[in-house]
Image (cartoon, helix red, strand yellow):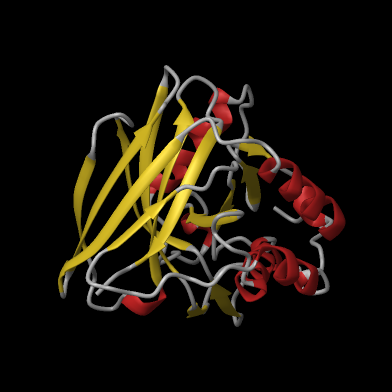
Amino acid sequence: MRIAMPKPLIKAAGFILMTTTIAAPALSAECSTKSPAQRVAVLELYTSEGCSSCPPADRWLSSIATAKISSDKLIALAFHVDYWDYIGWKDRFAKPEYSGRQREQVVVSGKDTVFTPQVMLNGKNYRGWRNDAIFLQDLTQVNSHAASVNIELNVKQAAKDSVAVSALANSTPKDTELYLALYENDLNSAVRAGENRGEQLHHDYVVRQWLGPFNPSTPANQTINLNPDWKTGDMGVVALVQNRANGEILQAVASKLCS
């Protein structure tokens, strides 16, 4: 689990802000968002509070939040896995389905080993995140391609304790599937046991709910219950379409919760 980690993506933030920042949509009773014409880069971080190699990767992902890269360029999701819970610390953000998601993506990509921290870029194992310059080049490369899929995402806070989500994809190739993710930013944990004992850990883009797969050409209408402890002002919803056969993510779109 111990891997040399990069410095956070702070030096490059000025460049990113000048080239990619777009004002976030204002919250309203209902938010309707469409995916952009270009392909969106999707980062998946598989991490655990019980993994001593993971905090630097968590900080790197949070540096992306600090850099305020527009979601029409890059969408990030942090899946906390549960398979390290047995070594002394139970990760409160972990769920078996997130570990299952990682295993599925690894298998369809032709590999047979899961590890943390693992970063995937559009469904493929990605090691370039350890170098800021390489990461920026790869981000630009993904965004340079026209999207093969268009997604419309509608988000409405139906009640104080739930949010109504609807997603539909157009022009989808065969063998594709749609997923929905509810995530939360600005989360902190005081770890009292395990490899990270005594550490104060900060997390962003933490997946709270993962739903799917759905038929992308049929509206995916879901009501997602919200835990009273979740901070809705720090939450958002992501819809993504991926190739079922190889796990490649073809397009994605994100929206803040609307109230």
Q: Is residue 253 in view?
A: yes
Residue sitting at x 63%, y 51%: 116
**Can you say which quadrant of the picture contains the C terminus?**
bottom left
Give whichever of 145, 76 is nearer the camera: 145
Residue 208 placement, left or right of 228: right
* Rendered view: 66 above or below 134: below
* Rendered view: 153 above or below 201: above
When asked about the image quadrant of residue 174, the answer is top left
Q: Is residue 82 in view?
A: no
- Position in image of residue 54 (x %, y %): 65, 62
When asked about the image quadrant of residue 176, the answer is top left
Q: Tell which residue pokes out farthest to the left in this image.
A: 159
- Position in image of residue 230 (x %, y %): 31, 75
Give whichever of 168, 36 is nearer the camera: 36
- Position in image of residue 154 (x %, y %): 29, 54
Give whichever of 99, 236 is nearer the camera: 236
